[in-house]
Amino acid sequence: MAHHDGDHDHDHDDLHDRGLQFDLSTLTGLLRRRRVLGLFAGAGAAATLAACGDPATSGNAATATTGSLTEIPQETAGPYPGDGSNGPNALTRSGVVRSDITTSFGSASGVAKGVPLTVNLTIMDASTGSAYPGAAVYLWHCDRDGQYSMYSQAVASENYLRGVQAANGNGLVTFKSIFPAAYSGRWPHIHFEVYPTLAGATSAGNKITTSQLALPAAVCTTVYASDGYSKSVRNLAQTTLTSDMVFRDGWTRQLATVTGGVSEGYVANLTVPV
């Protein structure tokens, strides 16, 4: 069912009432994170700092004793996942496996306008610290107006800004997209789910991780000063990473490194241990 757009479209993008499966996956993620924290404590502060470096810049902290990585935090998929868990399922539609997600596919023909953004995610096996080739990533986010295809009324017939990619031998997936808006109540972000294989990326029940990528404040400010993002200027000013309902408990390992500019476009990079 399509929902009306506007500020209240996103009021339910939180951790409540997501169902048993989400509750269990969230609990599992928390337990894993606590187990890793226990390993850090046992290794001692000096050894931890030597192995991990500055957590504000390293993105993903390696343990001192095993070489494993801290898993990316589990987050809500939000109310507009398009993975069959809440309404429509883009994953079963022919054409969803693609790198360029700026256009709709299948019978839809819309094109998402905005500042170009390439998203590179490197999927890692958290238990070994090695790349995870063959893992599949389903990535989606809102458009320049803060609307989600397949759900928001104005773009319910579109399916742009959604796509699936299989990781290469280095665990890398790449999506060509546009810079998402800042809508009321949320810090600018990109959703993604990780699946063990491309063949399994057809139902939310097969995913092994759900998380979100956060975009840096300075880059957001620059992008939102460009044409088409006027609403985002106000919304960004009313939200911070520390107040955001998803990132306020910690965003270090979800904050992408972003380079580029408005005219040539931006490139966002994030390492994702699962």
Image (tube, rainbow, N blue to C red):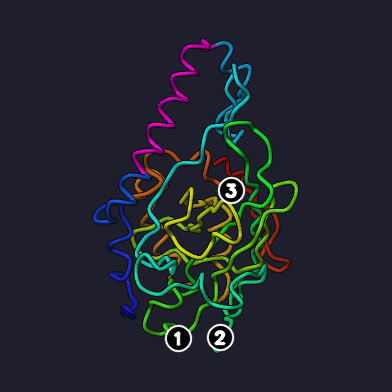
- Determine which quarter of the picture holds residue 12: bottom left
Q: Report x, y in % for residue 90.
A: 49, 73
Of residues 133 and 119, which is closer to you in this image? 133
- Residue at 51 percent across and 37 percent down: it is 71
Q: Earlier in the sequence, mark 3 or mark 2?
A: 2
Q: Amino acid at mark 2?
A: Gly
Q: Amino acid at mark 3?
A: Ala
Nearer to us of marks 3 and 2 is 2
Query: Quarter of the image containing the N terminus?
Result: bottom left
Dot 3 falls on a residue whose secondary structure is: loop
Of residues 210 and 149, which is closer to you in this image? 210
C-alpha gap between disc 1 and disc 2: 9 Å
42 horizontally vs 264: left or right: left
Label of residue 165 in the image: none
Magenta stretch encompasses residue 27: yes
Magenta residue span = 26-45
Pointer 3: what residue? 256
133 horizontally vs 6: left or right: right
Q: Report x, y in % for residue 98.
A: 65, 70
Pointer 2: what residue? 110
Of residues 239 and 18, which is closer to you in this image? 18
Label of residue 157 in the image: 1
Q: Report x, y in % for residue 227.
A: 57, 75
